Amino acid sequence: MSDEELKKLEKDVKKTKRLASEAAMELHDLIEDRLPDAYGELMGIAQTAYDACKAWDEANKKFLAASSEAA
């Protein structure tokens, strides 16, 4: 795998981690500030956070596998 491809995978990991962090902050804000009144939003925000974390995990695994192959 080329250095350019590895850099793209690393960029994907950073992007997905940022998105997962943003989703986690939104979930945190809901829990800290708006529950129990906004309980109807809980499942949607939790699913978004889960999906974002899963996307980061998949991108990170792909990057780590490619990095170990390149070494």
Image (tube, rainbow, N blue to C red):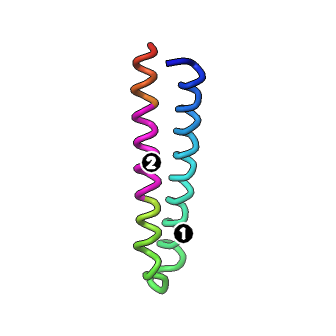
Q: Residue at x 58, y 27 (%)?
A: 7
In front of the other: label 2 or label 1?
A: 2
Q: Read off the magenta span.
A: 50-62
Dominant secondary structure (helix, strand or loop) of the stretch shown in magenta: helix
Q: Quadrant of residue 68?
A: top left
Q: Is residue 56 magenta?
A: yes
- What SS does tag 1 mark? helix
Q: What residue did someone put label 2 on?
A: 55
Percent of width and height locating residue 57: 41, 43
The reply to whether callout 2 and callout 1 are in contact (CB within 8 Å) is: no
- The three-letter code of the residue at mark 1 reads Asp
Q: Position of residue 22 (x, y in %)?
A: 56, 57
In the image, is residue 14 above or below residue 20? above
Q: Amino acid at mark 2?
A: Ala
The foreground one among 22 and 9 is: 9
Taking the spot 47% from the left edge, 68% from the top edge, the residue there is 45
Tell which residue pokes out farthest to the top in this image.
71
Residue ID for mark 1: 29
Where is residue 49 shown, x and y percent of the image?
45, 60
Residue at mark 2 to residue at mark 1: CA–CA distance:
21 Å
Answer left or right for 11 relative to 35. right
Q: Residue at x 58, y 44 (%)?
A: 15
Q: Earlier in the sequence, mark 2 or mark 1?
A: 1
